[in-house]
Amino acid sequence: MRVHSRNSLTQMDRGTKRSRHNYPIILRTAASAVVAFGVVALVVGCARNPGPTPARSVSTRAADADGSEPEPLTREAIKELPDDLLERGAATWVEFKLHNLPGTEEEAVLKLPRSYRMVYTTINVESEIEDGGWNQYFWNTRMMLNREAISDFEMIGADDYADLMHRAVAVGEKEEPDRKRLRRVGTPEAFVKSYDHSHLERFDDEFIGLKKRIPLSHIRTDYIREHPDEFVTE
């Protein structure tokens, strides 16, 4: 059972094939410049820290259902767009690229260009932790893409985030056998029970504190503006 983040509008179990109309990505929004979050949590409020501030959407509009391309990201757009719209535009292209890649979610993410993979991995970490902490992140990802996420944090100069994730992963790996056993039960109650076996909460608090001091979105948008060649799509 995959726990649906408060910030995830359509998600599937890891390891399954993605379809055109329902593939797992945390960045999906309504096909509009207006940000509209849907609350699709199987266990909303069941995590140890209910009601955390949700990460904002980072997509100006989802890729069309027929898979058509989003609006291009131009040099001018990368230079002139406000930070939130720039980040959404980059995330929209991540969604589009994943939409058109074969295989499981993890297989598709590994095929993305490195900079687009960074947008995916760092937002995924941020969104899941704000919703349910590191335990939820590890529950949903099954400990996959951790190495890539740490590397991506380092690439954009988010060294404090990389260090924090490295330490959280070390604890998460020790706890994974308990999570794996509870995942096989496949119920919301099993997910809630997984918190009883976890010692990750201190890293949740550290992550939230770090975000207040060094907003992750600022680091991402600074990187995009400083490396436009890696994101231009026209």
Image: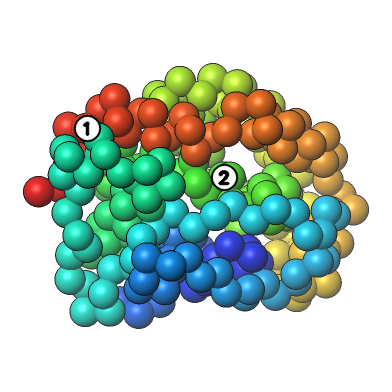
Q: Residue at x 46, y 44 (%)?
A: 121
Q: Nearer the viewer, mark 2 or mark 1?
A: 1
User: Can the viewer see residue 11?
Assistant: no
* Closer to us: 7 or 185: 7
Q: Residue at x 81, y 66 (%)?
A: 45
Question: Tag 2: residue type?
Answer: Val
Asked which secondary structure carries label 1, the reply is helix
* Closer to us: 29 or 103: 29
* Residue 104 image offset from top left, x and y in percent: 38, 62
* Closer to us: 204 or 222: 222
Which residue carries the number 2 mark? 125
Q: Residue at x 39, y 35 (%)?
A: 221
In the image, taking residue 209 as reference, residue 99 lies left or right, namely left
Give the farthest residue toward the left: 234
Question: Tag 1: residue type?
Answer: Pro
Per the rendering, the mark at residue 20 is: none
Say if 55 sits above or below 7 in the image.
above
Dot 2 or dot 1, earlier in sequence? 2
Say if 22 sits above or below 4 in the image.
below
